[in-house]
Amino acid sequence: MERLLVTYDWGEAFVALNLVLKPVIDELFLKQASDLALTEDDHLLGQIFYSLNEDCQRRRQWSQALVHTATQDTATQDTATNSEVIQAWSDKWYPGALPAVDALVPLFKGSGGAAGSRPLLNLTSRIGDFCADCLRAMQLQPGNN
């Protein structure tokens, strides 16, 4: 996040925040924490997180639409296409996103959950799969290096 604060190219900052980092953090805190709160009988917190997650879904849809529009515009043969530039920025930021989740997962450990609730196993892997699907929906590949 600190590197993002000093990313002065607005296109790169958009990709880093809206396509890579924010989906990871949103999925962890607003989806997984909502599910956890509901299993722990904290329905108010679960509903608040659920509502915030709905806002994040709208922002993801907006971001996807913007990327779709940008990638439909092709550059001249002398320069990279918008799709290639966006992919390069995604490749730059993606490798640091999932380790950030790994650092935060311990906050969710030791949560017993209600009887019959799904455990928070493979949380980083599930969030990684979610974010990879978000990138693929924009015809981008996750984690290319």
Image (cartoon, grey):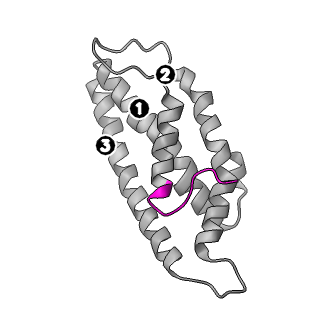
Q: Position of residue 100 (x, y in %)?
A: 62, 36
Tell me whether the residue at label 3 lies in contact with that at label 2, contact meaning CB atoms closer than 8 angstroms. Answer: no
Q: Amino acid at mark 1?
A: Gln
Q: Is residue 22 above or below residue 59?
A: above
Asked if the stretch drawn in magenta spans residue 143, the answer is yes
How many other residues sit within 10 Å of disc 3, few (<14), some (14-19) or many (≥20)? some
Kindly identify which numbered label has been placed on residue 145.
none
Q: Amino acid at mark 2?
A: Phe
Asked which quadrant contains residue 86, the reply is: bottom right
Name the residue nearer the viewer: 5 or 31: 31
Q: Is residue 51 above or below residue 80?
A: above
Name the residue nearer the viewer: 142 or 98: 142
Q: Amino acid at mark 3?
A: Ser
Asked which quadrant contains residue 77, the reply is: bottom right
Q: Position of residue 104 (x, y in %)?
A: 57, 28
Picture residue at 49% right of the left edge, 68% below the top: 67
How many other residues sit within 10 Å of disc 2, few (<14), some (14-19) or many (≥20)? some
Find the magenta span and give its range: 135-145
Q: Which is closer to the viewer, label 3 or label 2?
A: 2
Alpha carbons under labels 1 and 3: distance apart: 13 Å
Alpha carbons under labels 1 and 2: distance apart: 9 Å
Q: Which residue is mark 3?
A: 51
